[in-house]
DNA sequence: GCAGTAACTTCACGCCGTACAGTTTCTGCG
DNA sequence: CGCAGAAACTGTACGGCGTGAAGTTACTGC
């Protein structure tokens, strides 16, 4: 009964007033929700509070990402973030209703960053050389993953202690962007490749409508078999990168890079593309 | 200061004596370590205490696996296990010095189960039909993974909240068994496949000695390029299965099975094997 | 029977997410 | 201007976690 429970021996640390009123904000938070800020006319540039709120939200996310980068996904704890920012853990509840919501947001951001990286690589590839473009895309995928292993785990792994993805997946948008990008690979290869898939049994009904909504408009000529090919390419690339990120490859080979390059060569060959390598 | 800290509102629950002296053991524990049980002659069958200790260890593991199966890898908490067994959490420290050690042991067990599953599938395949054997191996791999998604995550994912694999990987033995199995696939395919890898640049020094120690004696004729092939096959299979286990495929296609089958067909084709399908 | 020791419990600590009840500070209206 | 309301934040509390230290019990071998 002596030393009361609750633990948390954290000393007050910065005590209000010292760096006192750090930030004050507005806008519908996780708590107030509806609020009455329709006032200013709803339209134009954000007011002071809104701006501060946006900044604080961004700071929370960036601190969370920094923590993740330095200590892995488990280092994302509300209390650690708050500590870093000189706030109480509870203050974060004004921005994210729950830790899982924070994580979901992070996943979205990180997944978007990955999608940006691969999209960029794709766009900068020579449009007329599908093999080179695919290599470029895949290399960007691997490079990004190795540069941000925590991000990769966040997206593709069991991200964080008790996290359960909310219905419909965590980052459906970014995931769709990646899949659409993959469909782009398949589309670029398809003219050379399609003769290998003449007997494919895939139909549109094999795929998720949400995926097709993005893919079919972007690549109207692509048959179901090509979408299946895109997903399989995804799997192929994901496999080696995932093993590498999680450290399973390093215990078997010292040259995961060489392995990946050979995989790309074989992939290009399997797509019957005119090789550039 | 009122309600004392420490939380843990667990009511005494079974209070000693009730189901009282559940188990008493001997043998070097995580605590005593050296002990003085050299007495009985070190040799023969275990004494009573040793037996009970082994049983308790097994029970801890099985409860942990059950918890994992029902609540995911995060459900593996010492306190939950202890609760289930009618002990205190600290009692487990007599069997595993730390939670991570428990998890490491579980990973080993689970990985071994996976290795058993794929080895069995391989051995029951028709020896003279490499394509069929590879399909059998791969199908066993996927089936096991889908049947034990938590096990798969435990092995290949961020297994459990703060777990960090101990030096040298978590389950090196089982991992090596799987890799050796993969080398078997490569070896079976190699006579048909090798002409595709005439220009491979892989050398023995690209691989971990520990892996080669197991692979080269088992398949003395295999060149480095074939070992690289084995690892790439691993990546290919791992990729699709991993995406499926983690739920990333389901949001894109309703037929992951069909996708996997096509992947196998293409794999067999890429290995230039006489197809059976 | 007695000393030693393995097995287990109790207590304690610091961490975590989160709920609830304040308190301060800003904002826009009258 | 003053004032109501709301947003942002703090304090306290609870239950859960892993783990360390110390104490208790029960079995073991001499």
Image (cartoon, coloured by chain):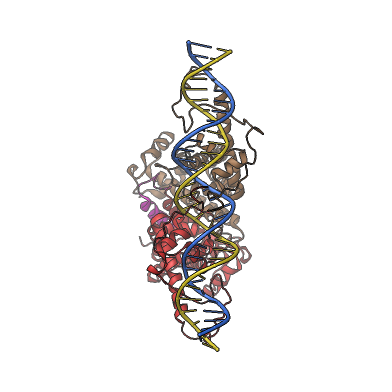
Chain colours: A brown, B red, C blue, D yellow
Closest to the observer, A22 or B12: B12
Q: Is residue B15 visible?
A: yes
| Type of secondary structure dominating the magenta stretch | helix
Q: Quadrant of residue A213?
A: top left
Give the residue drawn at x 50%, y 63%: B90
Where B74 sits versus A83, above or below?
Answer: below
Name the side, left or right, on which D21 lies relative to D13.
Answer: right
- What segment is highlighted magenta in the picture? B248-268
Where B102 sits versus A23, above or below?
Answer: below
Name the side, left or right, on which A216 lies relative to A153.
Answer: left
Tell me residue B268's x, y (percent): 43, 59
Q: Is residue A118 visible?
A: no
Give the residue drawn at x 53%, y 47%: B1
Tell me residue B253's x, y (percent): 38, 46
Tell me residue B58's x, y (percent): 43, 70
Closest to the observer, A38 or A86: A86
- Magenta span contains residue B253: yes
Number of numbered discs overlaid on the protein picture: 0
Of all residues, the one furthest to the right in this rendering is: A18
- Magenta span contains residue A160: no
Closest to the observer, B201 or A228: A228
Tell me residue A58's x, y (percent): 57, 34
């Amino acid at each position: 009964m002596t030393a009361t429970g609750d633990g948390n021996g954290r000393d007050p640390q910065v005590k209000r007033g010292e760096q006192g009123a750090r930030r004050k904000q507005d806008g519908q938070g996780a708590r107030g929700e509806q609020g009455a800020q329709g006032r200013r006319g709803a339209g134009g540039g954000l007011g002071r509070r809104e701006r501060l709120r946006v900044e604080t939200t961004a700071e929370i996310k960036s601190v969370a990402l920094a923590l993740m980068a330095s200590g892995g996904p488990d280092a994302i704890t509300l209390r650690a973030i708050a500590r870093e920012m000189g706030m109480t853990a509870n203050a974060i509840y004004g921005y994210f209703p729950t830790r899982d919501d924070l994580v979901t947001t992070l996943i979205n951001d990180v997944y978007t960053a990955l999608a940006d990286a691969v999209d960029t690589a794709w766009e900068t590839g020579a449009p007329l050389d599908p093999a080179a473009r695919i290599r470029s895309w895949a290399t960007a995928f691997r490079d990004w993953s190795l540069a941000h292993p925590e991000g990769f785990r966040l997206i593709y792994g069991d991200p964080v202690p008790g996290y359960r993805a909310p219905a419909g997946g965590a980052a459906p948008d970014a995931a769709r962007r990646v899949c659409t990008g993959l469909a782009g690979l398949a589309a670029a290869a398809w003219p050379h490749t399609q003769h290998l898939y003449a007997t494919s049994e895939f139909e549109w009904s094999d795929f998720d409508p949400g995926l097709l909504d993005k893919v079919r408009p972007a690549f109207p000529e692509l048959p179901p078999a090509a979408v299946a090919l895109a997903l399989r390419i995804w799997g192929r690339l994901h496999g080696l990168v995932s093993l590498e990120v999680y450290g399973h490859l390093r215990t078997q080979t010292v040259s995961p890079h060489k392995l990946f390059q050979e995989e790309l060569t074989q992939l290009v060959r399997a797509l019957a593309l005119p090789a550039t390598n």
